Amino acid sequence: KAGVTQTPRYLIKTRGQQVTLSCSPISGHRSVSWYQQTPGQGLQFLFEYFSETQRNKGNFPGRFSGRQFSNSRSEMNVSTLELGDSALYLCASNHMTGANTEAFFGQGTRLTVV
Amino acid sequence: GESVGLHLPTLSVQEGDNSIINCAYSNSASDYFIWYKQESGKGPQFIIDIRSNMDKRQGQRVTVLLNKTVKHLSLQIAATQPGDSAVYFCAENGGQTGANNLFFGTGTRLTVIP
């Protein structure tokens, strides 16, 4: 069973540009969550998608957006990039087992904004 | 907002000793807690979880203890090995059923001394 695939692994962008990151969850998982990881703020929840709908959203500006496709693959987009957006962006493929959900993380996309 | 923090940012232990990593949380509504291990260049890896109706859960070489009275969580690793060197995060669900948006602590870096 393939794991969570995030592409690209590394990305360098210039301030003001926009970027799109991709995540393919584990086959059969319909929920995908996105997180931003920085040394200063740690791991912070961005948003979660389930069956192509955003179910939850963290406390990030509107420049951060996402979507999910019918095959559960998800993308996140950051527009008008700022230096502070440099981070590791992690995607979690969520497996719901009764009342709990186990989150399986991908390796992340390392975004550097210069 | 959510607050999940760690008492110590770093921990060094001798190979073969037991390790204890602590975590405090502030949301009394949280009912599901997870420990993750993150190695350099990789995404967080699920270690063990516990629901709030339990105070202890054991896995392979790991034990999680939950004290709801003082909102404290700990991860015990028995017979620590060099491969256990990583950053360990606690996470909680903020009282929301499932864990599709997790709130993470800042992490503790565990270094195992051979």
Image (tube, grey):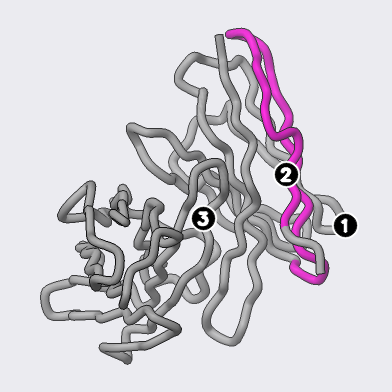
Q: Pick the residue in front: A92 or B13.
A: B13
- Residue B44 image label: 3
Q: Viewed as shown, does residue A95 lie left or right of A59? A: right
- Residue B40, label in figure: none
Q: Indicate the position of residue B4 as horizontal and vertical percent values.
A: 27, 56
Chain that bears disc 2 = A
Mark 3 or mark 1, whichever is nearer to me: 3
Q: Position of residue A11 (x, y in %)?
A: 68, 23
CA gap, disc 2 and disc 1: 17 Å
The residue depicted at 37 percent of the width and 57 percent of the height is: B89
Compare residues B100 and B110 and report the one nearer the observer: B110
Lower position in the chain sequence, tag 2 or tag 1: 2
Specify the subunit that label 1 lies on.
A
Say which residue label 1 marks.
Answer: A70
Mark 2 crowd level (few <14, some 14–19, many ≥20, 10 Å Cα):
many
Place residue A38 in its image quadrant: top left
The reply to whether callout 3 and callout 2 are in contact (CB within 8 Å) is: no
Mark 3 element type:
loop
Task: Read off the magenta span.
Answer: A4-29
Q: What residue does disc 2 label?
A: A6
B54 drawn magenta: no
Chain on which label 3 sits: B
Question: Can you name the residue that lies furthest to the right here?
Answer: A71
Q: Residue at x 56, y 74 (%)?
A: A101
Residues at discs 2 and 1 both on one chain: yes
The residue under label 3 is which amino acid type? Pro
Residue in the image at 38% along x and 66% along y: B81
For the residue labelled by badge 2, is the local secondary structure a helix, a strand or a loop? strand
From the viewer's perspective, is B1 left or right of A4? left
